[in-house]
Amino acid sequence: MVKRETQSRQALYLAEGGIEWAKAHLLVNPELRQGNVALETGRVSIVIESIEGGYKVISKGRSGLAIRKIEETLQLDTGNWVLISYQELHY
């Protein structure tokens, strides 16, 4: 159980890191629509959708058998990201 809980937390942290990765890369390339990051603790898949006034970013973190998914709606305001909505997606 401890291993499963650890993997679940790592997957959530990976998903959160994927959101941060998207924010950094969107500043340089606003046309970016996806990305993947592989780390020692797991993998992250990021999907970015352009919406009116901002972006919807879905980040899926995998660690071992655990998968956690986060969706954020973001807007860029004078060089700073503003979080409009956040939710953890369950499936």
Image: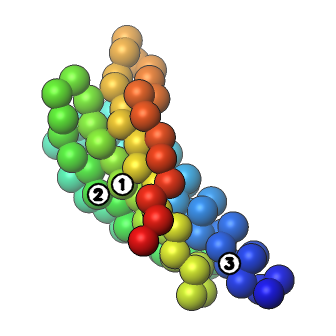
- Find the distance from the CA under tag 3 to the CA under tag 2: 22 Å
Q: Is residue 15 above or below residue 56?
A: below
Q: Quadrant of the C terminus?
A: bottom left
**Disc 2: which residue:** 47
Image coords of residue 44 (percent x, y): 45, 68
Q: Is residue 61 above or below residue 64?
A: above
Q: Secondary structure at mark 1?
A: strand
Q: Amino acid at mark 1?
A: Ile
Q: Residue 58, which numbered label?
A: 1
Image coords of residue 2 (percent x, y): 83, 83
Q: Residue 4, which numbered label?
A: none
- Residues at circles 2 and 1 in contact by the CB criterion of under 8 Å: yes
**Disc 3: which residue:** 7
- Nearest the camera: 90 or 22? 90
Q: Amino acid at mark 2?
A: Val
Q: Secondary structure at mark 2?
A: strand
Image coords of residue 28 (percent x, y): 30, 37
Quadrant of residue 80 within the rendered picture:
top left
**Residue in the picture at 29% in, 57% down:** 47
Residue 21 makes an appearance in the image:
no
